[in-house]
Image (cartoon, rainbow, N blue to C red):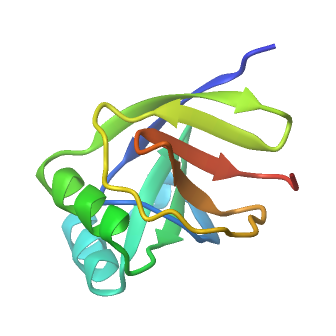
Amino acid sequence: MRIRKSIMIFMSCLLVLSGCSKPVDDMKDEQLEERQNHMENKINIIVGDHILTATLLDNIPAQSLYEILEKSPITIDMSDYGGFEKVGQLPFSLPSQNENIQTEPGDLILYNNNSFVIYYGVN
């Protein structure tokens, strides 16, 4: 069964979900929070009525995505894959920085330059 989730990414993304979440209703001043996240290399991802905070790694794909998302947030329709990850197509391609990594629940990765992946289980 395909489960679709709509995810809005407010700033940028890639890698290492920090595990913090809070209901959207509890948001403070949105501009202040976005400025603070920018200074800490963090992004907000909205899933349903929850905000997830992710920390970015310092790499070219993350920087490129950040530059795009600074202009406007995006929505990604995601589907379940293999019972351990959600995968969705970005509306653009990003430069790659291929390397072998060991994923863990909470990791966000770029796959094939245009797929956004959120791991929630073990591969």
Q: Position of residue 3 (x, y in %)?
A: 71, 21
Dividing the image into 4 quarters, which one contains the N terminus?
top right
- Look at the image and tell me whether residue 43 can be seen: yes
Q: Position of residue 91 (x, y in %)?
A: 31, 31
**Looking at this rendering, what residue extends furthest in the left direction?**
71
- Look at the image and tell me whether residue 28 can be seen: no
Q: Residue at x 46, y 62 (%)?
A: 14
Looking at the image, residue 15 lies above or below residue 6 = below
Q: Residue at x 51, y 67 (%)?
A: 53
Quarter where residue 28 is shown: bottom left
Foreground pick, 43 / 119: 119
**Looking at this rendering, what residue extends furthest in the top direction?**
1
Looking at the image, residue 72 lies above or below residue 91 = below
Q: Position of residue 21 (x, y in %)?
A: 60, 63
Whether residue 43 sits left or right of residue 51 in the image: it is left
Looking at the image, residue 70 lies above or below residue 42 = above
Foreground pick, 119 / 28: 119
Q: Residue at x 75, y 31 (%)?
A: 81
Quarter where residue 52 is shown: bottom right
Whether residue 6 sits left or right of residue 38 in the image: it is right
Whether residue 52 sits left or right of residue 90 in the image: it is right
Quarter where residue 56 is shown: bottom left
Q: Residue at x 17, y 45 (%)?
A: 72
